[in-house]
């Protein structure tokens, strides 16, 4: 089920049913956003990609436009979500090239949305 988030310059007026116009006659900006999932700090990179990005990536291969956007406060994990852990990407690349895993590197499970999308796109092209 989709969840709705309402952001308004005058949320009290909006909740009161007067809409974007306050009692002072001023029109206030009000925006509503729908989202499908909320992830906590324990969500895996794979789960985030599968639930939120994969369908958009595959739709582009059918000719549709799509975009992935990471938005939020500084330090909340936007870059990590989009790119993932760099050692994880290097390890995955080494294994994919027939090499062996780098010492101390992970198995590649911490790859973010961008490397996973690239893998799906190139897998489709092959």
Image (cartoon, rainbow, N blue to C red):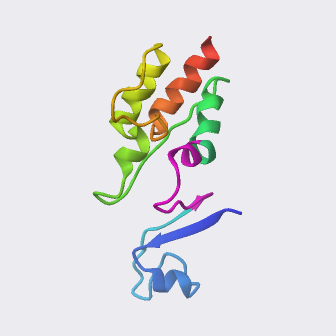
List x then y, in percent, for residue 86.
34, 35
Report the residue at 50% width, 63% height from top. 40
Q: On the rendered structure, is 44 left or right of 79?
A: right
Return the residue nearer the eye: 58 or 83: 83
List x then y, in percent, for residue 111.
45, 37
**Quadrant showing the N terminus:** bottom right
**Quadrant showing the C terminus:** top right
Q: On the rendered structure, is 5 left or right of 55?
A: left
**Is 46 within the magenta?**
yes
Return the residue nearer the eye: 114 or 87: 87
Q: Residue furthest front?
A: 103
Report the residue at 59% width, 60% height from top. 34
**Is 53 within the magenta?**
no
Vertical order, 119 against 4 (above or below): above
Q: Which residues are magenta?
A: 34-49
Report the residue at 37% width, 40% height from top. 85
Q: Residue furthest right?
A: 1
Vertical order, 25 against 32 (above or below): below
Return the residue nearer the eye: 33 or 118: 118
Report the residue at 45% width, 33% height from top. 114
Q: Residue furthest left?
A: 74
Vertical order, 121 against 39 (above or below): above
List x then y, in percent, for residue 26.
39, 78
List x then y, in percent, for residue 70.
42, 48
Q: On the rendered structure, is 41 left or right of 90?
A: right
Q: How many marks?
A: 0
């Amino acid at each position: 089920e989709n969840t709705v988030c309402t952001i308004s310059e005058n949320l009290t007026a909006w909740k009161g049913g007067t809409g974007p116009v306050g009692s002072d006659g001023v029109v206030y900006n009000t925006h509503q956003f729908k989202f499908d999932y909320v992830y906590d700090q324990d969500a895996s990179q794979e789960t985030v990609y599968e639930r939120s990005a994969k369908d958009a990536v595959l739709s582009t291969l059918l000719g549709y436009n799509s975009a992935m956007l990471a938005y939020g406060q500084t330090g909340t994990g936007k870059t990590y979500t989009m790119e993932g852990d760099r050692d994880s990407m290097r390890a995955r690349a080494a294994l994919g090239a027939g090499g062996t895993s780098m010492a101390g590197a992970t198995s590649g499970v911490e790859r973010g949305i961008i490397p996973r999308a690239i893998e799906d796109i190139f897998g489709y092209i092959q």
